[in-house]
Image (cartoon, rainbow, N blue to C red):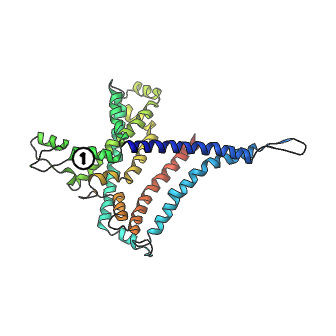
């Protein structure tokens, strides 16, 4: 444990050190290569414009190299592998894509992902809005927001471990340690293996991500609501609007852009959901999702890079339109300013 902490600290120090050395070194290099010269008549020739033109590209160079190595090349390689067999050597054309649209397990994963997309962003946004709007109205609101935001600091796997104890089931003749079963037995009911119940177990897993993302949504909405104009709220009160009407017809329209940003951010996270399903059920009992299925095909049972790459491309195709829509919306907002 101590060794891992030290490794992490050393990695951070090295990373920051390399960045500082690159920053200082690139400036020195530019100043040396494009230093000011003098003409034959001893007049100064300034190369300030050349240095300024190249300096941004020098600082962008590492990011562009990393972008190519860790994004562009893997995407191109994934596309290539999706047209090959499990070895990645024999070309099979569209065979993997034909399999993708016929495989029952993959179709179930698509359906489960669709359920996650409908439920998790919606409830996270709703709960985040409610908490952000109500927390500032009570004296213990700051403490409540801190507690709700705390799950954001926990990894998905860590959150899954916590919720394992909530859903834990030990058999009818064993002592139950799961919180949910303890509550059920308090009312005289029989304990259940909650995460093995078909269909409903998907919602039990969604609760974990909603628990995490509500804090994220709450923080963003809390800041946005504080930016709502007091004049518009007072004008609505003068016109006879009650607090509920003010919230829905005055405050919500003014923070709609923020709501959309939070919604799309959580949507992208949901499309990539993997850790929670892997840690809780490993895709068993009808809880399979695309990312976990991709992992199974890629790295288990000998691996099938062709089918795994095909699933990876399906995930990318699902995420890219949302990102393009976000980028276009940001550009429109910048142009309107």
Q: In the picture provided, is 39 more to the left or to the right than 117?
A: right
Image coords of residue 239 (percent x, y): 41, 27
In this view, the residue in front, 273 or 325, is 273
Residue found 27% across the figure and 52% down from its top: 280
In this view, the residue in front, 218 or 1, is 1
Q: Is residue 287 above or below residue 39?
A: below
Secondary structure found at label 1: helix
Image coords of residue 251 (percent x, y): 42, 34
Mark 1, residue position: 164
Quadrant of the snapshot with the C terminus: top right
Quadrant of the snapshot with the N terminus: top left
Q: Is residue 244 visible?
A: no
Image coords of residue 184 (percent x, y): 14, 43
Estimate how packed mark 1 is, as few (under 14), some (14 to 19) or many (20 or more) residues with alpha carbons within 10 Å.
some
Residue found 62% across the figure and 43% down from its top: 23
Q: Quadrant of residue 166?
A: top left
Q: Is residue 304 above or below residue 127?
A: below
């Amino acid at each position: 444990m101590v060794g891992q902490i030290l490794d992490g600290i050393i990695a951070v120090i090295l990373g920051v050190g390399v960045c500082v050395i690159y920053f200082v070194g690139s400036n020195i290099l530019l100043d040396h290569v494009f230093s000011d010269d003098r003409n034959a008549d001893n007049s100064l020739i300034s190369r300030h414009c050349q240095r300024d033109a190249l300096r941004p590209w020098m600082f962008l160079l590492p990011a562009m190299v990393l972008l190519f190595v860790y994004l562009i090349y893997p995407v191109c390689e994934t596309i290539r592998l999706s047209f090959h067999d499990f070895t990645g050597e024999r070309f099979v054309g569209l065979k993997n894509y034909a399999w993708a649209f016929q495989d029952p397990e993959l179709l179930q994963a698509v359906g489960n992902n669709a359920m996650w997309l409908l439920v998790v962003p919606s409830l996270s946004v709703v709960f985040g809005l409610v908490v952000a709007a109500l927390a500032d109205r009570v004296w213990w609101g700051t403490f409540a927001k801190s507690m709700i935001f705390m799950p954001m600091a926990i990894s998905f796997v860590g959150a899954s471990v916590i919720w394992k104890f909530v859903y834990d089931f030990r058999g009818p003749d064993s002592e139950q340690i799961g919180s949910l079963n303890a509550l059920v037995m308090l009312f005289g009911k029989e304990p259940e293996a909650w995460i093995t119940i078909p269909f409903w177990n998907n919602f039990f897993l969604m609760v974990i991500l909603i628990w995490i993302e509500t804090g994220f949504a709450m923080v963003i909405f809390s800041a946005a609501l504080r930016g709502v104009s007091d004049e518009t709220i007072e004008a609505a009160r003068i016109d006879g609007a009650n607090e509920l009407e003010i919230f829905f017809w005055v405050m919500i329209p003014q923070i709609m852009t923020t709501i959309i940003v939070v919604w799309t951010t959580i949507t992208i996270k949901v499309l990539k959901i993997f850790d929670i399903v892997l840690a809780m059920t490993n895709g068993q009992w009808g809880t399979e999702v695309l990312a976990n299925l991709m992992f199974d095909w890629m790295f288990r049972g000998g691996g099938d890079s062709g089918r795994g790459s095909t699933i990876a491309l399906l995930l990318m195709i699902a995420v890219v339109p949302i990102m393009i829509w976000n980028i276009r919306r940001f550009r429109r907002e910048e142009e309107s300013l």
